[in-house]
């Protein structure tokens, strides 16, 4: 027997099936699935294609073909059945279902229509509407939204439970009544106007309205009769309250995003994968030197070309984003609007469309120029420290060799007669040794290990006194201008080293002004904060005197500026410079607990700033001058790990009447001292294996507090002896050692 479904029901049925929230299956007699709706895929986990290649036995593990056929015959007679059973999800999960099944004979073929509801959480079904067919009743009550069918007068022909609940009535009372009687007057008038429009035009419509604190969107679809006239309306009302709240929340979120976008200090940009700006925030415009985001967008037509991305760099970045969808903290150099260079850190991620293609990229840009500058200063400081350690070590070892060369040459010179033809050769050896000693002194100055004699000096007096030899250094086409502070600052310094600083800087300035110019020297006093501003490193609290040395010469480019303090770095021709001038200045300043920095630009000259701590003027203690006698009869212990230096000192002392005991290292020195009671003086090399000079000194003074000690080293005294010994408490002589100066020092100590 075929089902009698009129045309309006066909339209309505199709409409309801599309929105049904229950699984709907159409089955053949052999159990094969012929039709499924969207909900079937959701409930079972299978795709539509998979379901259409399955049978009901694949979904219901408890159903056998025999039982199915027996039930089929039963349904031929009873037509319908409602029962509970179980279905198997694609994942293997078994879940309970309620099945509403109808037997259908259509076009001479037998079918079964099954409406299946997952009742794991919900056990009840909507009531079957009396006026609708069994299939239609199941469909319209399957949805959680309002479903209605009305005629031109507004009479309700079909309604579901949700509609009745929303109108505070029941389905029985609603069907047969006029819809507008269940609505407030104003709402009823608006609804009637919308529905009359559909009846008159035959075009579907939709509208939103609010009722009792909830928002609904109502869709009205025309149902045509056999005369193609609109006789009824299918009405579908959806509760959009939560959706509306979500949209409002999204709008608020977008407003918050826009506030962040507009006010953050980090640049944000939306740009295409091809390099075109779509949107930028004010911070990005400021970073690149533009007055507004609009100016930046209109001025920059290609991000890569105009904001400076090297071709190979751009290719790498784009490939990385294409492969991984994002790039983080990519540091690169860019140009601002005025042409100046900045360093930026760029992060970007790709935004994809539904097809998985890149629509655009969203990126952030942070100006890290200051960070890069500080990193460069740190690397420079670390490099200078490393080079200083290396230079100091080389100079120390070289001083030992010079001590031997100079010493033996001096001994040889002493034993020669005045007319000896070989005497001139020895003089040349000694002269070359002195020059080599000057070279090591420069290396030690750079490494801050050159012995210095610090005492309070007036800076203006020292600089003023240097004027006479600076004038002789400069050619006639260079003018020397000096501007000294009215408040003559006092500093703790070695005046000869200050002269060395001025000489080296003046020599560099002279070479930078081959066509003439002006060399300016100024002094003044600044606070420590000014030093940080200039030197980029925090200075110890207090006041600082500074010497400013400026020239109007050719200036330096970036590459030269990175290396000006490096030892042996020079821009002069081979043979015209050692490359130790500025490195010596650097070492002297740092050894004086000061700071040095500079400004220079190609074609605009160079200015050096030297900062030295200001002190209160003090009176230097004067030591009595002793009569110098080089010969003696005392016993002297020599502790020196260099065999050549030790033999030289022994030869010098024995030649002048002294008795000598040798020690090859620190422990040997202690052993020899303990085993000999007649030692008058100990000569200690400061750097020795096993125990250094300071460690030996600490042990022997406990045994004999009155013992006399002379330290010697290629390093400065404060580096060698470290802290804990007061100035003047020990005697010290620096290498390379001159026999005459060494003997005078020994005699001076023994006579004191």
Image: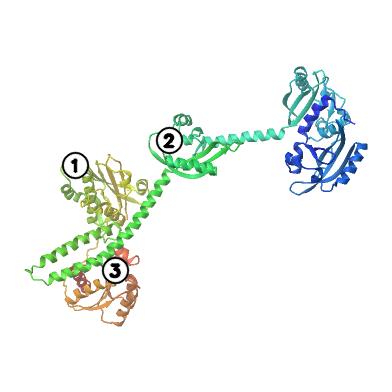
Looking at the image, residue 520 sits to the left or right of residue 58; the answer is left
The residue at the point 41 percent across, 44 percent down is: 370
Position of the C terminus by quadrant: bottom left
Label ID, residue 729: 3
Give the Cα separation between the discs numbered 1 and 2.
47 Å
The residue at the point 83 percent across, 33 percent down is: 161
Of the image marks 2 and 3, the number of the one nearer the N terminus: 2
Where residue 150 appears, as percent x and y from the top left, is 82, 24
Tag 1 near tag 3, CB within 8 Å: no
Q: At numbered mark 1, what does the secondary structure look like: helix, strand or loop? A: strand
Q: Is residue 320 above or below residue 385?
A: above
Looking at the image, residue 558 sits to the left or right of residue 460; the answer is right
Looking at the image, residue 327 sits to the left or right of residue 519; the answer is right
Please state which of the two labelled residues, at mark 1 or mark 3, is closer to the viewer: 1
Label ID, residue 305: 2
Which residue in the protein does label 1 denote?
Answer: 479
User: In this view of the protein, which residue sits in the foreground, 511 or 521?
Assistant: 511
Where residue 714 appears, as percent x and y from the top left, is 27, 65
Q: Is residue 582 above or below residue 413?
A: above
């Amino acid at each position: 027997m075929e089902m009698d479904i009129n045309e309006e029901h066909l339209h309505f049925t199709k409409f309801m099936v599309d929105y049904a929230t229950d699984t709907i299956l159409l089955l053949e007699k052999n159990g094969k699935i012929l039709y499924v709706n969207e909900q079937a895929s959701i409930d079972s986990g299978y795709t539509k294609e998979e379901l259409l290649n399955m049978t009901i036995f694949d979904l219901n593990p408890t159903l056998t073909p025999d039982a199915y056929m027996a039930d089929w015959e039963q349904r031929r007679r009873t037509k319908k059945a409602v029962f509970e059973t179980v279905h198997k999800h694609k994942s293997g999960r078994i879940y309970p279902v309620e099945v509403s099944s109808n037997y259908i004979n259509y076009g001479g073929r037998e079918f079964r229509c099954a409406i299946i509801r997952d009742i794991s959480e919900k056990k009840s079904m909507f009531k079957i509407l009396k006026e609708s067919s069994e299939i239609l009743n199941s469909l319209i009550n399957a949805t959680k939204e309002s479903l209605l069918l009305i005629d031109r007068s507004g009479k309700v022909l079909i309604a579901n439970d949700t509609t009745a609940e929303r109108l505070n009535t029941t389905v029985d009372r609603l069907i047969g009544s006029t819809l507008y009687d269940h609505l407030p007057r104003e709402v009823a008038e608006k609804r009637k106007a919308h529905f009359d429009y559909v009846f008159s035009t035959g075009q579907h419509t939709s509208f939103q309205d609010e009722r009792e604190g909830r928002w609904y969107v109502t869709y009205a679809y025309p149902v045509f009769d056999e005369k193609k006239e609109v006789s009824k309306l299918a009405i579908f009302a959806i509760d959009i309250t939560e959706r509306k709240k979500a949209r409002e929340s999204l709008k608020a979120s977008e407003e918050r995003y826009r506030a962040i976008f507009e006010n953050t200090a980090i640049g944000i940009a939306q740009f295409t994968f091809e390099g075109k700006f779509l949107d930028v925030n004010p911070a990005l415009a400021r970073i690149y030197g533009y007055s507004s985001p609009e100016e930046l967008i209109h001025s920059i037509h290609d991000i890569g070309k105009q904001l400076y991305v090297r071709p190979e760099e751009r290719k790498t970045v784009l490939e990385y984003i294409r492969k991984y969808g994002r790039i983080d903290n990519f540091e690169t150099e860019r140009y601002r609007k005025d042409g100046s260079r900045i360093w930026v850190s760029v992060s970007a991620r790709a935004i994809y469309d539904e097809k998985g293609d890149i629509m655009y990229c969203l990126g952030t840009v942070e100006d890290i120029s200051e960070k890069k500058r500080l990193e460069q200063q740190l690397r420079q400081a670390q490099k200078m420290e490393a080079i200083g350690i290396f230079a100091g070590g080389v100079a120390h070892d070289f001083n030992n060799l010079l001590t031997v060369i100079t010493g033996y040459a001096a001994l040889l010179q002493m034993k020669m007669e005045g007319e000896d033809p070989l005497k001139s050769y020895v003089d040349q050896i000694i002269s070359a040794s002195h020059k080599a000693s000057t070279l090591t002194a420069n290396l030690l100055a750079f490494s801050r290990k050159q012995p210095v004699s610090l005492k309070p000096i007036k800076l203006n007096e020292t600089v003023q006194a240097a004027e006479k030899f600076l004038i002789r250094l400069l050619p006639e086409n260079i003018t020397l201008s000096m501007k000294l502070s009215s408040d003559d600052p006092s500093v703790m310094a070695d005046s000869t080293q200050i002269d060395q600083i001025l000489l080296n800087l003046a020599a560099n300035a002279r070479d930078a002004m081959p066509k003439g110019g002006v060399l300016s020297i100024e002094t003044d006093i600044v606070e420590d904060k000014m030093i940080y501003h200039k030197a980029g490193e925090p200075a110890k609290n207090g006041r600082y005197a500074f010497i400013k040395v400026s020239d109007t010469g050719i200036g330096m480019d970036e590459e030269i500026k990175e290396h000006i303090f490096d030892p042996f770095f020079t821009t002069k021709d081979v043979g015209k410079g050692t490359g130790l001038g500025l490195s010596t200045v650097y070492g002297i300043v740092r050894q004086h607990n000061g700071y040095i920095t500079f400004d220079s630009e190609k074609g605009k000259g160079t200015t050096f700033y030297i900062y030295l701590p200001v002190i209160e003027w003090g009176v230097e203690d004067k030591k009595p001058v002793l009569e110098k006698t080089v010969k003696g009869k005392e016993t002297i212990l020599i502790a020196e790990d260099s065999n050549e230096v030790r033999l030289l000192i022994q030869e010098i002392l024995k030649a002048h009447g002294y008795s000598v005991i040798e020690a090859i290292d620190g422990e040997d020195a202690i052993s020899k001292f303990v085993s000999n009671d007649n030692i008058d003086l100990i000569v200690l090399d400061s750097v020795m294996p096993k125990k250094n000079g300071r460690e030996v000194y600490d042990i022997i003074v406990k045994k004999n507090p009155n013992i006399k000690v002379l330290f010697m080293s290629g390093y400065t005294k404060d580096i060698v002896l470290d802290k804990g010994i007061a100035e003047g408490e020990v005697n010290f002589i620096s290498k390379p050692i001159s026999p005459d100066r060494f003997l005078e020092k020994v005699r001076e100590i023994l006579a004191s």
